[in-house]
């Protein structure tokens, strides 16, 4: 049990994070860019890169709150997607996800060989680059007013399918690196369970959404109780998704998508939006504050490797996803928008990196390059999406 004094210190840190993040969001928004960029800059400022205000212990204490933010944000994104629109865009989403995974993995593999990594290390680099961080893109799309569009549905659908495809790629890579037949058998079972969970959850929850929602409304006569019960349900499904090796955010998005056409959904969105509006910012601030990037920027022996990985990371998603979006019927600017929408990497890339390190196939230079890739894509994506979105609206 932590002391009241420590709780007070953590609350003070939380107050500073929210204050700085919102101030930065306002400044960034004033210049016409998505507020999420302000959250990232706030994290860089408050973390070890600049002020070192937030220490590792504080970040750990606030970890659950930041995940609550991103889970609630993805649930809200699912509700605003509309199930019927998701079904219409499933074909293009699948194209985009496959394009990004194939291009990223191949480019990552050959980039690794080019800079002197072993085949196993290069395969893991490819697996790392397949990961897409959907949270940043969703926040940006929300900020620029792209919710409810076909582009939004395609990116969200592709990001969710990307999670499943990334699991397959990671599993195959891990099985090859560890070189065991039993591992491959376990991999096949894991993939079947994960994909089955994803498909069944969407189908069952959407089919029974009216009954589930009516039950929640029947139990909760108070409006706040209804929202609280809905949040509890989202958290349970998010927990279940982790148990089948999918991300927390996949489960949250599935529930939101399933409930997207219930009666009174606009009112639910309005009431529920207070949670991600505060705590989603916390996710991005703390993610940016976790690592000191200064050492990686001043060592010349890292810069060449980092440059190659950055190039592979950008081309893999922007060209891979953008090209396949074009093949599925989007115009030039829409395809480019989708490509940049699939560009960000964050927590999933770090998880895969850590897994590779535990197998002894991820080097310090790989870790450094992924850290820089996360920062660069987090900063570039909101700026690129905001500018391309202006061109899309002009064309219309």
Image: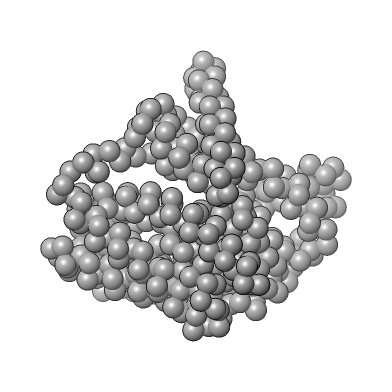
Q: Between residue 106 and residue 308, name the one nearer to us.
A: 308
User: Residue, x 27% and y 53% (percent of image)?
Assistant: 369
Return the x and y of residue 121 as percentages of the image width and height. Answer: 20, 63
Q: Between residue 48 and residue 379, name the one nearer to us.
A: 379
User: Residue, x 37% and y 56% (percent of image)?
Assistant: 349
Q: How many marks?
A: 0
Asked whether residue 222 appears in the rendered view, the answer is: yes
Q: Between residue 92 and residue 191, name the one nearer to us.
A: 92
**In the drawing, does residue 390 fall left or right of residue 85?**
left
Return the x and y of residue 197 as percentages of the image width and height. Answer: 55, 68
Return the x and y of residue 215 as percentages of the image width and height. Answer: 81, 56
Asked whether residue 57 appears in the rendered view, the answer is: no
Return the x and y of residue 19 as percentages of the image width and height. Answer: 57, 30
**In the drawing, does residue 310 fall left or right of residue 190?**
left
Type of colouring:
one colour
Q: Quadrant of the C terminus?
A: bottom right
User: Residue, x 43% and y 50% (percent of image)?
Assistant: 379
User: Residue, x 79% and y 56% (percent of image)?
Assistant: 266
Q: Is residue 369 above or below residue 49?
A: below
Toward the top, the furthest residue is: 5
């Amino acid at each position: 049990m932590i002391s009241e004094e420590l709780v007070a210190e953590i609350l003070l840190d939380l107050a500073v994070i929210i204050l700085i993040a919102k101030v930065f969001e306002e400044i960034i928004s004033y210049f016409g860019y998505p507020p999420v960029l302000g959250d990232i800059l706030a994290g860089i400022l408050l973390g070890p890169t600049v002020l070192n205000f937030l220490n590792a212990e504080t970040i750990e204490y606030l970890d659950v709150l930041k995940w609550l933010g991103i889970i609630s944000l993805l649930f809200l994104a699912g509700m605003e997607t509309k199930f019927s629109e998701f079904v219409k865009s499933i074909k293009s989403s699948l194209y985009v996800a496959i394009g990004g995974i194939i291009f990223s993995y191949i480019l990552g593999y050959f980039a690794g060989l080019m800079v002197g990594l072993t085949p196993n290390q290069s395969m893991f680099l490819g697996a790392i680059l397949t990961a897409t961080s959907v949270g940043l893109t969703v926040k940006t799309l929300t900020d620029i007013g792209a919710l409810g569009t076909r582009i939004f549905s395609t990116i969200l659908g592709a990001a969710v399918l990307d999670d499943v495809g990334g699991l397959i790629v990671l599993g195959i890579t891990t099985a090859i690196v560890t070189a065991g037949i039993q591992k491959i058998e376990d991999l096949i079972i894991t993939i079947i369970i994960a994909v089955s969970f994803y498909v069944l959850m969407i189908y069952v929850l959407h089919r029974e959404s009216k009954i589930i929602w009516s039950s929640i409304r029947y139990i909760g006569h108070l409006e706040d109780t209804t929202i609280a019960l809905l949040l509890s349900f989202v958290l349970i499904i998010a927990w279940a998704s982790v148990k089948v090796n999918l991300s927390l955010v996949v489960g949250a998005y599935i529930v939101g998508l399933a409930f997207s056409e219930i009666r009174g959904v606009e009112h639910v969105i309005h009431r529920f939006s207070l949670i991600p509006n505060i705590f989603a910012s916390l996710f991005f601030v703390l993610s940016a504050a976790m690592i000191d990037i200064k050492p990686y920027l001043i060592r010349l022996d890292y810069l060449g490797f980092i440059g190659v990985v950055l190039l592979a990371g950008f081309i893999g998603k922007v060209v891979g996803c953008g090209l396949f979006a074009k093949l599925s019927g989007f115009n030039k600017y829409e395809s480019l928008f989708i490509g940049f929408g699939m560009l960000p990497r964050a927590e999933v890339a770090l998880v895969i990196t850590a897994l590779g390190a535990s197998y002894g196939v991820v080097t310090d230079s790989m870790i450094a390059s992924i850290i820089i890739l996360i920062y660069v894509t987090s900063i570039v994506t909101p700026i690129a999406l905001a500018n391309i979105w202006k061109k899309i609206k002009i064309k219309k």
